[in-house]
Image (cartoon, rainbow, N blue to C red):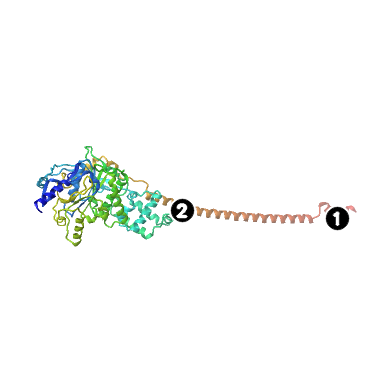
Amino acid sequence: MTENTSTSQVDEIRAGYAFEGPSLEFGAAVVDGTAHPDATVRIPLSAMNRHGLVAGATGTGKTKTLQLMAEQLIAQGVPVFLADIKGDLSGMASPGEPNDKITSRSADVGLPWAATAYPVEFYALGGQGTGIPVRASVSTFGPTLLSKVLGLNETQESSLGLVFHYADTKGLWLDTVADLRAVVQFLTSDEGKADLKDFGGLSSATAGVILRELVNFSAQGADLFFGLPEFDTADLLRTAPDGRGIASMLELPGVQDRPQLFSTFLMWLLADLFHDLPEVGDLDKPKLVFFFDEAHLLFNGASKEFLDSIQQTVRLIRSKGVGVFFVTQSPKDVPADVLAQLGNRVQHALRAFTPDDAKALKAAVRTYPNTAYDLEELLTQLGTGEAIITVLSEKGAPTPVAWTRMRAPQSLMAPSPDALLASTVAASPIAPKYVTAVERESASEMLGKAEVARTEAEQAAVVEAENAKVREAAAAAAEKERLAAEKQAAKDAEVAARTRAAEERKQAAQPSMVEAVVKSSAFKSALR
C-alpha cells in the first residue's frame, strides 16, 4: 500500500469514528502494521443497543474485549451482564496490575491506562459456586427453552408444551423438575388420560422420553437451578451509589460441563427482561448491555421455534433499551437472521486450517463493507489483542472497516481472589432475597395430596361396600328371622285354634249337669 493510500485510509477511519457524543474506545487504527494513535476506533454509547458480535478463534482476545467494553460501559453508568464461564472476568472486581506489556500497549494506541476496580455483583446458578443463587421456576422457564436444554425434537417439544398448558390451566405450579415429572406421570395414568381428553393426547412413548430426559437432567444437578425464590431480572439494572453501572457476573465454572443448560439459562434471563421492560425507543445510552458468551452453544441443534424466539427477542428488545452482544468463535455460529440484526462487529483472528474454515472465512469477509484491507488475508494474521471493527455511527450508518489494536483493560486480567468474591457476595444488599431456597405447595405436593385423597376415598368406598354387604346380610338375616317368627306364630296360632276347637267340640259333646242329673239312675228312682 502506498504512503498516500495509507494516509487516505487513516484519514477515512479518523473521520468515520469522530463521534460527537459519549463513546467506548477500542484502541487505535492500524494500517500497514502501524498503529495510529490519532485515529481512535470507538463505538457510540447510543449505538450499544443496536446489538453486536464479538468473534474470533480461541486465544485471540475475545474475553479481554468483553472486559474492555464492560469497563467503559460501567464507567458511564450503564449496567452490564456477563457470563463468566472460565472465571477470568471476575478480575473486574480488582484493579489491574501494571506491567511492561500494558505500558507498551498504552503508548502504542495513545490511550491512558490506570489500574481500576469496578463494582461487580457475583451470581451462581442455583448457588453452585461462589455467588448469589440464581433460580427460575420451571413454569416461567417454559417448554421452549426447556426442550432446548433436554434435547427434545419438535414433536416432543409440542407434547411438553401441552403438559405446561395443562398444568397452567389446572393451577398446578411447576416450581421444580420434580413438579414437572409429577404432572407427566399423572397425565399417563388412567385418571390423567381421561383428564387430558379436552386438551389432546400425550403418547406413552413421548411421555417416556420426556421423563427419561428429566431424570437425566436432575442427575446432572439441574434440581439446584429450578425453584424459588425466582431471580428478578430487574436486579440486573442496578447502578452503584457513585453512579457507575454494576457488572452482574454469572459465575459458571461449576457448570462448564453443562453448556446447554447455562446457555439456555442466559436466554431465559434475556427473554424475562424483554417481557418485563417497557418500551423506551432509542436512548442516549442503554439501560443494560447483555454479553452472551459461547453463543454457539445456544444455537446448536435448536428447533425452529427456539430460533424464532431468539430472533424475535433480539429484534424487539432494542426498543426496550437493552443491547445484546453475542460472543463466539466464528460468525457462522450465529444464524443468518440473527446475524443480520447485529450492527456492531468486533472480529478477532479466524483460523483457516480446513476447507470448512476457509469457506467460513470467505463468508465472513463478504459481510463487511468495502475496504482497502485484504480482509481474507488479514483475518488470519491478526495478532492477539487485535481485531477488525465496524460499528454503527450515531446516525446509524456503518463506519469504515478498521484494523484495530485494542487498548488493555484497566481491571485485573485474571481471576479475583476467592476471598474477594466471598466478601462481595456476603456484603451484597440483594443477597438476602435469594440465599435461602423456598418451598411451597406446588404440583408435586398438590398431585400427591390429590392421590392421597383419591386413595382414601377408594379405601373408604371399599369399607363402605363391605359395611353395606354386612348391613345387607344383617337385614336379610333379620328379615329371615322375622319371617320365621311370623311363620312360627301363625303355626302356633293355628295349633291353638285347633286345640280350642277340639276342646269346644269335646265340651259340646258332653251333657250339661242338668242333663246328667236327669239322666242319672238316682233321679229316675226318685221319680218312681
The residue depicted at 35 percent of the width and 52 percent of the height is 180
Residue 161 appears in the picture as rendered: yes
**Residue labelled with disc 2:** 458
465, above or below 72, in the image: below
Q: Position of residue 144 (x, y in %)?
A: 32, 53
319 horizontally vs 500: left or right:
left
Relative image position of residue 105 (x, y in whole percent): 11, 47
Position above or below: 21 against 53:
above
Find numbered disc 1 in the image and state the secondary structure of the residue it sits on: helix
What is the x, y in percent for residue 32?
10, 52
Amino acid type of the residue tagged 1 in the rendering = Ser
Residue drawn at (88%, 54%) of the image: 525
In the structure shown, which secondary structural element does the residue marked by tag 2 occupy? helix
Q: Position of residue 35 (x, y in %)?
A: 11, 48
Question: Camera-side residue: 324 or 464?
Answer: 324
Which residue is depicted at the point 40% across and 55% down? 187
Residue 521: assigned label: 1
In this rendering, position of residue 374 left or right of residue 218: left
* Of the pair 86 and 275, the residue shown nearer to us: 275
Of pointers 1 and 2, the one earlier in the residue sequence: 2
Q: Is residue 44 left or right of residue 110?
A: right
